[in-house]
Amino acid sequence: MSKTVIEITGMTCSHCEKSVAEELMKVQGVTLASADHSTGTASVEGSSITQQDLADAVEEAGYQSVGFKTSDG
């Protein structure tokens, strides 16, 4: 299982966080997702997840991913 932190532009409130987290949870392999507008990041845990799938989910929520940091856990 890996953990990925995604840098996201445009999130300004808790509704933004919820929208991003809901879209990320739809990605196959994601087991946990949360977002924080104050830091401009989302955290995702799971396996066999591609950065492109995560970027697509963030875009589907109406935002743009600008960076990824993945660590194996």
Image (spheres, rainbow, N blue to C red):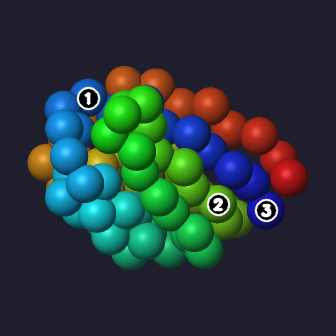
* Label 3 neighbour load within 10 Å: few <14, some 14-19, many 20+: few
Instruction: Tell me if mark 2 has few (under 14), some (14-19) or many (20+) residues whose alpha carbon lies within 10 angstroms of its own.
Output: many
The amino acid on which the numbered mark 1 sits, given as a three-letter code, is Thr
Along the viewing direction, whichever of 5 and 39 lies nearer the viewer: 39
Q: Disc count in the image?
A: 3
Determine the residue located farthest toward the right in the rendered image.
Answer: 73
Asked if residue 64 is positioned above or below residue 19 in the image, the reply reads: above
Q: Quadrant of residue 31?
A: bottom right
Residue 30: in sight, yes or no?
A: yes
In space, the residues marked 2 and 3 are separated at their CA atoms by 7 Å
Q: Which mark is residue 45?
A: 2
- Please say if the residues under marks 2 and 1 sit with CB atoms less than 8 Å apart: no
Give the labeled residue for mark 1: 9
Q: Helix, strand or loop at disc 1?
A: strand
Task: Name which residue lies at 86% across and 52% down.
Answer: 73
The three-letter code of the residue at mark 3 reads Met
Which residue does the numbered mark 3 point to in the structure image? 1
Q: 48 or 67, which is in the foreground? A: 67
Q: Are marks 2 and 3 in contact (CB under 8 Å)?
A: yes
* Residue 37, above or below 20: above
Residue drawn 40% across the image and 45% down it: 36
First in sequence, mark 2 or 3: give its number: 3
The first of marks 1 and 3 along the sequence is: 3
x, y percent for residue 18:
28, 63
Q: Position of residue 11 (x, y in %)?
A: 22, 39
Please tell me in which quadrant of the rendered image residue 69 appears.
top right
Above or below residue 73? Residue 48 is below
